[in-house]
Image: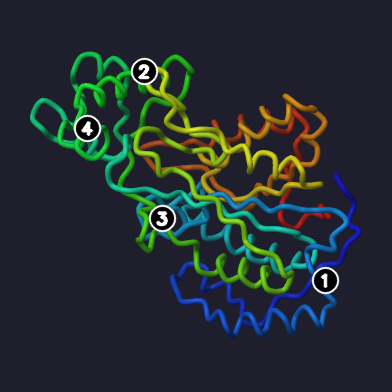
Protein backbone atom coordinates (compact mmCIF):
# COMPACT_ATOMS: atom_id res chain seq x y z
CA UNK A 1 0.00 0.00 0.00
CA UNK A 2 1.16 3.53 -0.72
CA UNK A 3 2.08 5.65 2.26
CA UNK A 4 0.25 8.93 2.71
CA UNK A 5 2.21 11.72 1.02
CA UNK A 6 -0.59 14.04 -0.02
CA UNK A 7 -2.71 16.29 2.08
CA UNK A 8 -6.38 15.87 2.80
CA UNK A 9 -8.87 18.67 2.40
CA UNK A 10 -11.68 20.00 4.59
CA UNK A 11 -15.34 19.26 4.00
CA UNK A 12 -17.23 22.12 2.34
CA UNK A 13 -19.83 23.72 4.58
CA UNK A 14 -22.72 22.83 2.27
CA UNK A 15 -22.15 19.07 2.66
CA UNK A 16 -24.79 17.61 4.95
CA UNK A 17 -24.59 13.84 5.57
CA UNK A 18 -28.29 13.81 6.44
CA UNK A 19 -29.08 14.75 2.83
CA UNK A 20 -27.39 11.68 1.37
CA UNK A 21 -30.66 9.76 1.70
CA UNK A 22 -32.61 12.47 -0.16
CA UNK A 23 -33.28 13.40 -3.77
CA UNK A 24 -32.63 17.09 -4.40
CA UNK A 25 -31.62 19.54 -7.11
CA UNK A 26 -27.93 20.37 -7.05
CA UNK A 27 -27.50 24.19 -7.29
CA UNK A 28 -24.85 23.94 -9.99
CA UNK A 29 -24.07 27.62 -10.44
CA UNK A 30 -23.55 28.14 -6.71
CA UNK A 31 -21.49 24.98 -6.34
CA UNK A 32 -19.34 25.91 -9.34
CA UNK A 33 -18.51 29.30 -7.84
CA UNK A 34 -17.71 27.71 -4.49
CA UNK A 35 -15.55 25.03 -6.12
CA UNK A 36 -13.43 27.58 -7.97
CA UNK A 37 -13.02 29.66 -4.83
CA UNK A 38 -12.19 26.45 -2.91
CA UNK A 39 -9.49 25.57 -5.44
CA UNK A 40 -7.89 29.01 -5.15
CA UNK A 41 -8.05 29.05 -1.36
CA UNK A 42 -6.64 25.54 -0.92
CA UNK A 43 -4.18 25.65 -3.85
CA UNK A 44 -5.92 22.79 -5.65
CA UNK A 45 -4.31 22.48 -9.08
CA UNK A 46 -5.96 21.33 -12.34
CA UNK A 47 -6.08 17.56 -12.81
CA UNK A 48 -3.94 17.90 -15.93
CA UNK A 49 -0.94 18.73 -13.71
CA UNK A 50 -1.10 15.51 -11.68
CA UNK A 51 2.10 13.51 -11.88
CA UNK A 52 0.32 10.43 -10.63
CA UNK A 53 -3.01 9.90 -12.34
CA UNK A 54 -5.63 8.53 -9.96
CA UNK A 55 -8.98 7.32 -11.24
CA UNK A 56 -12.04 6.86 -9.02
CA UNK A 57 -14.48 4.38 -10.55
CA UNK A 58 -17.96 4.73 -9.05
CA UNK A 59 -20.14 1.78 -9.97
CA UNK A 60 -23.89 2.41 -10.24
CA UNK A 61 -24.20 4.92 -7.39
CA UNK A 62 -27.74 5.62 -8.55
CA UNK A 63 -31.03 6.24 -6.76
CA UNK A 64 -32.42 2.90 -7.93
CA UNK A 65 -29.78 1.05 -5.85
CA UNK A 66 -29.01 3.55 -3.11
CA UNK A 67 -32.28 4.88 -1.68
CA UNK A 68 -34.79 2.75 0.27
CA UNK A 69 -37.85 3.97 -1.63
CA UNK A 70 -36.44 2.91 -4.99
CA UNK A 71 -36.49 -0.44 -6.78
CA UNK A 72 -33.30 -2.28 -5.82
CA UNK A 73 -32.02 -0.66 -2.65
CA UNK A 74 -28.81 -2.31 -1.49
CA UNK A 75 -29.36 -2.52 2.25
CA UNK A 76 -26.40 -4.75 3.04
CA UNK A 77 -26.01 -6.27 6.49
CA UNK A 78 -27.11 -3.13 8.34
CA UNK A 79 -30.24 -2.54 6.28
CA UNK A 80 -29.03 0.96 5.39
CA UNK A 81 -25.85 -0.09 3.61
CA UNK A 82 -25.86 2.06 0.49
CA UNK A 83 -26.77 5.22 2.41
CA UNK A 84 -23.97 4.66 4.92
CA UNK A 85 -21.60 3.82 2.07
CA UNK A 86 -22.42 7.03 0.23
CA UNK A 87 -21.89 9.20 3.30
CA UNK A 88 -18.38 7.76 3.48
CA UNK A 89 -17.95 8.10 -0.28
CA UNK A 90 -18.86 11.80 -0.27
CA UNK A 91 -16.44 12.34 2.60
CA UNK A 92 -13.76 10.51 0.63
CA UNK A 93 -14.24 12.65 -2.48
CA UNK A 94 -14.18 15.95 -0.60
CA UNK A 95 -11.26 14.93 1.64
CA UNK A 96 -9.24 13.88 -1.41
CA UNK A 97 -10.42 16.55 -3.82
CA UNK A 98 -6.90 17.43 -4.91
CA UNK A 99 -5.69 13.83 -5.00
CA UNK A 100 -8.28 12.28 -7.33
CA UNK A 101 -7.49 13.02 -10.97
CA UNK A 102 -10.68 11.81 -12.61
CA UNK A 103 -14.02 10.37 -11.54
CA UNK A 104 -15.76 7.77 -13.69
CA UNK A 105 -19.37 7.05 -12.64
CA UNK A 106 -21.01 4.08 -14.33
CA UNK A 107 -24.73 4.35 -15.00
CA UNK A 108 -26.91 1.24 -15.19
CA UNK A 109 -29.27 2.23 -18.02
CA UNK A 110 -32.40 0.28 -18.91
CA UNK A 111 -35.61 0.35 -20.91
CA UNK A 112 -38.70 -1.79 -20.35
CA UNK A 113 -38.16 -4.51 -22.94
CA UNK A 114 -35.00 -6.30 -21.85
CA UNK A 115 -34.25 -9.97 -21.29
CA UNK A 116 -34.09 -9.59 -17.49
CA UNK A 117 -37.36 -7.65 -17.09
CA UNK A 118 -40.72 -9.36 -16.42
CA UNK A 119 -42.34 -8.37 -19.73
CA UNK A 120 -39.81 -10.39 -21.75
CA UNK A 121 -41.11 -13.74 -20.46
CA UNK A 122 -44.50 -15.44 -20.07
CA UNK A 123 -45.72 -18.80 -18.75
CA UNK A 124 -48.42 -21.04 -20.23
CA UNK A 125 -51.09 -18.73 -18.81
CA UNK A 126 -49.48 -15.64 -20.29
CA UNK A 127 -48.34 -14.41 -16.88
CA UNK A 128 -45.00 -12.71 -16.39
CA UNK A 129 -42.42 -13.91 -13.83
CA UNK A 130 -42.26 -12.00 -10.58
CA UNK A 131 -39.12 -9.99 -9.80
CA UNK A 132 -36.38 -12.15 -8.23
CA UNK A 133 -37.47 -15.19 -10.27
CA UNK A 134 -34.51 -17.28 -11.43
CA UNK A 135 -35.02 -18.72 -14.91
CA UNK A 136 -32.99 -21.87 -15.53
CA UNK A 137 -31.99 -23.53 -18.77
CA UNK A 138 -34.23 -26.51 -17.99
CA UNK A 139 -37.27 -24.27 -17.46
CA UNK A 140 -36.80 -22.65 -20.85
CA UNK A 141 -36.21 -26.01 -22.55
CA UNK A 142 -39.38 -27.42 -20.94
CA UNK A 143 -41.46 -24.39 -21.87
CA UNK A 144 -42.19 -23.25 -18.32
CA UNK A 145 -40.96 -19.84 -19.39
CA UNK A 146 -41.03 -18.68 -22.97
CA UNK A 147 -40.45 -15.46 -24.85
CA UNK A 148 -43.27 -12.93 -25.03
CA UNK A 149 -43.89 -13.04 -28.79
CA UNK A 150 -45.29 -9.50 -28.82
CA UNK A 151 -41.80 -8.15 -28.12
CA UNK A 152 -40.45 -9.43 -31.43
CA UNK A 153 -41.82 -6.28 -33.11
CA UNK A 154 -39.40 -4.14 -31.08
CA UNK A 155 -36.49 -6.51 -30.53
CA UNK A 156 -36.06 -8.74 -33.60
CA UNK A 157 -37.80 -7.07 -36.55
CA UNK A 158 -40.90 -9.16 -35.92
CA UNK A 159 -39.07 -12.49 -36.08
CA UNK A 160 -40.42 -14.44 -33.10
CA UNK A 161 -38.37 -17.53 -33.88
CA UNK A 162 -35.17 -15.53 -33.86
CA UNK A 163 -36.00 -14.06 -30.45
CA UNK A 164 -36.88 -17.50 -29.05
CA UNK A 165 -33.65 -18.93 -30.40
CA UNK A 166 -31.64 -16.19 -28.72
CA UNK A 167 -33.43 -16.60 -25.38
CA UNK A 168 -32.62 -20.33 -25.28
CA UNK A 169 -29.04 -19.69 -26.38
CA UNK A 170 -28.66 -17.00 -23.74
CA UNK A 171 -29.65 -19.14 -20.75
CA UNK A 172 -27.59 -22.01 -22.20
CA UNK A 173 -24.56 -19.73 -22.35
CA UNK A 174 -25.02 -18.60 -18.75
CA UNK A 175 -25.38 -22.21 -17.62
CA UNK A 176 -22.30 -23.38 -19.54
CA UNK A 177 -20.16 -20.62 -18.01
CA UNK A 178 -21.30 -21.31 -14.44
CA UNK A 179 -22.90 -17.88 -14.06
CA UNK A 180 -25.87 -17.08 -11.88
CA UNK A 181 -29.11 -18.21 -13.56
CA UNK A 182 -30.91 -15.48 -15.47
CA UNK A 183 -32.47 -13.28 -12.79
CA UNK A 184 -35.66 -11.35 -13.42
CA UNK A 185 -35.29 -7.90 -11.91
CA UNK A 186 -37.96 -5.30 -11.23
CA UNK A 187 -37.97 -2.46 -13.72
CA UNK A 188 -35.09 -0.30 -12.53
CA UNK A 189 -32.53 2.30 -13.61
CA UNK A 190 -34.99 3.33 -16.29
CA UNK A 191 -33.63 5.84 -18.77
CA UNK A 192 -35.41 9.14 -18.29
CA UNK A 193 -36.51 8.25 -14.76
CA UNK A 194 -35.45 9.53 -11.36
CA UNK A 195 -34.07 6.12 -10.43
CA UNK A 196 -31.46 6.39 -13.18
CA UNK A 197 -29.88 9.52 -11.71
CA UNK A 198 -26.84 9.54 -9.47
CA UNK A 199 -27.59 9.94 -5.77
CA UNK A 200 -27.90 13.71 -5.39
CA UNK A 201 -25.20 14.10 -2.74
CA UNK A 202 -22.76 12.01 -4.78
CA UNK A 203 -23.62 13.93 -7.94
CA UNK A 204 -22.93 17.13 -6.03
CA UNK A 205 -19.53 15.88 -4.87
CA UNK A 206 -18.62 14.67 -8.36
CA UNK A 207 -19.65 18.00 -9.91
CA UNK A 208 -17.72 19.92 -7.25
CA UNK A 209 -14.60 17.85 -8.01
CA UNK A 210 -15.02 18.43 -11.75
CA UNK A 211 -15.09 22.22 -11.37
CA UNK A 212 -12.39 22.43 -8.71
CA UNK A 213 -9.98 20.24 -10.69
CA UNK A 214 -10.98 21.46 -14.18
CA UNK A 215 -11.66 17.95 -15.45
CA UNK A 216 -14.64 16.42 -17.22
CA UNK A 217 -16.65 13.73 -15.46
CA UNK A 218 -16.43 10.58 -17.56
CA UNK A 219 -19.89 8.99 -17.38
CA UNK A 220 -20.06 5.39 -18.62
CA UNK A 221 -23.53 4.10 -19.52
CA UNK A 222 -24.12 0.35 -19.49
CA UNK A 223 -27.01 -2.08 -19.72
CA UNK A 224 -29.10 -0.71 -22.58
CA UNK A 225 -28.76 -3.77 -24.84
CA UNK A 226 -32.13 -5.60 -24.67
CA UNK A 227 -30.67 -9.05 -25.30
CA UNK A 228 -28.08 -9.37 -22.54
CA UNK A 229 -27.44 -8.53 -18.91
CA UNK A 230 -24.56 -6.11 -18.27
CA UNK A 231 -23.54 -6.34 -14.61
CA UNK A 232 -19.93 -5.41 -15.33
CA UNK A 233 -19.28 -2.04 -16.96
CA UNK A 234 -16.38 -3.68 -18.80
CA UNK A 235 -18.35 -6.39 -20.60
CA UNK A 236 -21.93 -7.63 -21.10
CA UNK A 237 -22.70 -11.19 -20.02
CA UNK A 238 -23.20 -12.51 -23.56
CA UNK A 239 -21.66 -10.92 -26.65
CA UNK A 240 -23.32 -12.80 -29.51
CA UNK A 241 -26.39 -14.64 -30.77
CA UNK A 242 -26.85 -18.34 -31.47
CA UNK A 243 -25.72 -17.86 -35.08
CA UNK A 244 -22.59 -15.98 -34.07
CA UNK A 245 -23.79 -12.46 -34.75
CA UNK A 246 -22.26 -9.88 -32.42
CA UNK A 247 -24.79 -8.04 -30.25
CA UNK A 248 -22.37 -6.37 -27.85
CA UNK A 249 -18.67 -5.93 -27.14
CA UNK A 250 -16.23 -5.38 -24.34
CA UNK A 251 -15.69 -1.78 -23.25
CA UNK A 252 -12.14 -1.70 -24.60
CA UNK A 253 -11.79 2.06 -24.20
CA UNK A 254 -12.61 2.02 -20.49
CA UNK A 255 -10.46 -1.05 -19.87
CA UNK A 256 -7.45 0.74 -21.36
CA UNK A 257 -8.24 3.93 -19.47
CA UNK A 258 -8.27 2.10 -16.15
CA UNK A 259 -5.05 0.26 -16.95
CA UNK A 260 -3.36 3.57 -17.83
CA UNK A 261 -4.06 5.15 -14.43
CA UNK A 262 -1.28 5.00 -11.85
CA UNK A 263 -3.91 4.06 -9.29
CA UNK A 264 -7.53 2.96 -9.62
CA UNK A 265 -9.93 3.28 -6.69
CA UNK A 266 -13.27 1.46 -6.88
CA UNK A 267 -16.51 1.99 -4.94
CA UNK A 268 -20.22 1.52 -5.60
CA UNK A 269 -23.09 -0.97 -5.61
CA UNK A 270 -23.63 -3.76 -5.25
CA UNK A 271 -20.49 -5.37 -3.91
CA UNK A 272 -21.84 -8.83 -4.73
CA UNK A 273 -22.98 -8.07 -8.26
CA UNK A 274 -21.97 -5.17 -10.52
CA UNK A 275 -18.94 -4.22 -8.43
CA UNK A 276 -17.61 -7.78 -8.15
CA UNK A 277 -18.12 -8.59 -11.81
CA UNK A 278 -16.51 -5.34 -12.95
CA UNK A 279 -13.46 -6.05 -10.78
CA UNK A 280 -13.38 -9.66 -12.01
CA UNK A 281 -13.29 -8.45 -15.61
CA UNK A 282 -10.62 -5.86 -14.78
CA UNK A 283 -8.50 -8.52 -13.08
CA UNK A 284 -8.78 -10.76 -16.15
CA UNK A 285 -7.66 -7.94 -18.44
CA UNK A 286 -4.81 -6.99 -16.10
CA UNK A 287 -3.65 -10.60 -15.82
CA UNK A 288 -3.38 -10.81 -19.60
CA UNK A 289 -0.87 -7.93 -19.53
CA UNK A 290 1.00 -7.98 -16.22
CA UNK A 291 -0.28 -9.51 -12.98
CA UNK A 292 1.62 -6.90 -10.96
CA UNK A 293 -0.77 -4.23 -12.27
CA UNK A 294 -3.34 -5.56 -9.79
CA UNK A 295 -1.34 -3.87 -7.03
CA UNK A 296 -2.44 -0.43 -8.21
CA UNK A 297 -6.14 -1.23 -7.68
CA UNK A 298 -7.75 -0.13 -4.38
CA UNK A 299 -11.18 -1.40 -3.36
CA UNK A 300 -13.05 0.84 -0.89
CA UNK A 301 -14.83 -1.86 1.07
CA UNK A 302 -16.63 0.60 3.34
CA UNK A 303 -18.14 2.31 0.28
CA UNK A 304 -19.98 -0.75 -1.05
CA UNK A 305 -22.45 -3.35 0.26
CA UNK A 306 -23.66 -6.78 -0.89
CA UNK A 307 -27.23 -7.58 -1.83
CA UNK A 308 -29.05 -8.77 1.30
CA UNK A 309 -32.81 -9.33 1.41
CA UNK A 310 -33.61 -10.57 4.94
CA UNK A 311 -35.27 -13.96 4.87
CA UNK A 312 -34.88 -14.24 1.10
CA UNK A 313 -31.25 -14.05 -0.03
CA UNK A 314 -27.88 -12.95 1.32
CA UNK A 315 -24.90 -12.58 -1.02
CA UNK A 316 -22.44 -11.53 1.70
CA UNK A 317 -20.51 -14.81 1.61
CA UNK A 318 -20.18 -14.74 -2.18
CA UNK A 319 -19.03 -11.11 -2.09
CA UNK A 320 -16.43 -11.81 0.59
CA UNK A 321 -15.10 -14.80 -1.34
CA UNK A 322 -14.77 -12.74 -4.51
CA UNK A 323 -12.92 -9.97 -2.70
CA UNK A 324 -10.56 -12.44 -1.05
CA UNK A 325 -9.72 -13.64 -4.55
CA UNK A 326 -9.03 -10.05 -5.61
CA UNK A 327 -6.79 -9.52 -2.58
CA UNK A 328 -4.93 -12.76 -3.28
CA UNK A 329 -4.29 -11.46 -6.81
CA UNK A 330 -2.64 -8.33 -5.40
CA UNK A 331 -5.47 -5.81 -5.21
CA UNK A 332 -5.72 -3.69 -2.07
CA UNK A 333 -8.76 -4.01 0.22
CA UNK A 334 -8.98 -0.68 2.03
CA UNK A 335 -11.32 1.66 3.87
CA UNK A 336 -12.06 5.19 2.76
CA UNK A 337 -10.19 6.54 5.80
CA UNK A 338 -6.99 4.58 5.11
CA UNK A 339 -3.84 6.34 3.86
CA UNK A 340 -3.90 5.32 0.20
CA UNK A 341 -2.41 8.45 -1.38
- Crowding near the residue tagged with mark 4, few <14, some 14–19, many ≥20 C-alpha atoms within 10 Å: many
Q: In this view, does 40 lie to the left or right of 3?
A: left
Say if mark 3 contacts mark 2, CB within 8 Å. no
The residue to which callout 2 is attached is: 242
Q: What is the quadrant of residue 29 in the picture? A: bottom right
State which mark lies toward you, 4 or 3: 4
Residue 264 in picture, x, y percent from top left: 73, 47
Residue 210, how many percent across, how many down?
A: 67, 68
Residue at horizontal 81 percent and vertical 83 percent from the top:
41
Q: Is mark 1 on a helix, strand or loop?
A: loop
Camera-nearest label, 3 or 2: 2
Query: What residue does disc 1 label?
Result: 45
Mark 3 — residue?
A: 64
Q: Which of marks 1 and 3 is nearer the N terminus?
A: 1
Spatial CA distance of label 4 from label 1 is: 53 Å
C-alpha separation, residue under disc 2 versus residue under disc 4? 19 Å
Name the element at disc 2.
loop
Q: Residue 121 carries which label?
A: 4
Position of 321 with respect to 23 (left or right) is: right
Alpha-carbon span between mark 1 and mark 2: 52 Å
291 or 73, nearer to the observer? 291
In front: 44, or 202?
44
Amino acid sequence: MFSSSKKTFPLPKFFNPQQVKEVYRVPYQQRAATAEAWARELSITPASTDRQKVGLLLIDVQNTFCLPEFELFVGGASGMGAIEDNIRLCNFIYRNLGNITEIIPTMDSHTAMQIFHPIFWIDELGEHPEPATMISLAEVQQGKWRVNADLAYSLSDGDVGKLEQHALYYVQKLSDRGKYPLTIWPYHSMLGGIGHALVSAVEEAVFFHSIARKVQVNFELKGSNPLTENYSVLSPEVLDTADGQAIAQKNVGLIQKLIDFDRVIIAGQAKSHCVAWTIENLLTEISNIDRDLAQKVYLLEDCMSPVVIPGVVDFTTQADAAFQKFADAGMNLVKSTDAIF
